[in-house]
Amino acid sequence: MPQMLSHIALIVADPTRTAHLLTGVFEDARVTRELDAEDSHPSMTVRLAGLDFELIRGSGPAARNGDHIAFQVSKPEQLACAERLTALALDFDMARRDTALYFSDYDNHVFELDVVEE
């Protein structure tokens, strides 16, 4: 039986650019493995929310669909990420009475910041 997620792999045109996006939006995101251009499977790793995101060079999804990755955040965290997205000149949408923020990376992967107040 699976015990936990090991990693999430995203196919992206430019792993470095996507890593910059993730580290620019999320304060706790850290690059843990740099891109090795000599590797036959060029990728890099960003650690975010206790999980490794493998950013693999290739052609990502042709269009956005309902697939997305959702992170549980507090309202102040959501608003801080919205400010960072604005500073990076990236569009985002607020939904569900502003309890959900959706944004996409450069390769049509969709991320949600889901406010869950306790």
Image: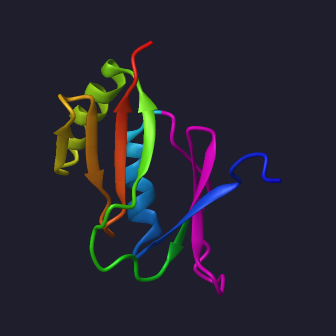
- Asked where in the image residue 75 lies, by quadrant, the reply is top left
The residue positioned farthest toward the front in the image shown: 1
Asked if residue 86 can be seen in this view, the reply is yes
Q: Residue at x 50, y 78 (%)?
A: 57
Q: In the image, which residues are magenta?
A: 28-54
Magenta stretch contains residue 110: no
| Image x and y of residue 10, in percent | 50, 67
Image location of residue 72, percent across then percent down? 45, 32
Q: In the image, is residue 95 above or below residue 44?
A: above
* Position of residue 80 in the picture relative to residue 9 (left or right): left
Residue at x 32% of width, y 59% of height: 105
Name the image quarter holding the C terminus.
top left
Name the residue at 51% across, 34% down.
Answer: 28
| Residue 23 percent location from the top left of the image | 43, 45
Determine whether, in the image, residue 89 is placed left or right of residue 81.
Answer: left
Q: Please tell me which residue is depicted at 19% across the width and 51% down the height of the picture.
A: 90
Count of numbered circles in the view: 0
User: Where's residue 21, x and y in %?
Assistant: 36, 52
Q: Is residue 14 above or below residue 86?
A: below
Colour pattern of the rendering: rainbow
Residue farthest along the top direction in this orientation:
118
Residue 71 appears left or right of 43: left
Q: Residue furthest right?
A: 1
Can residue 35 be seen by looking at this rendering?
no
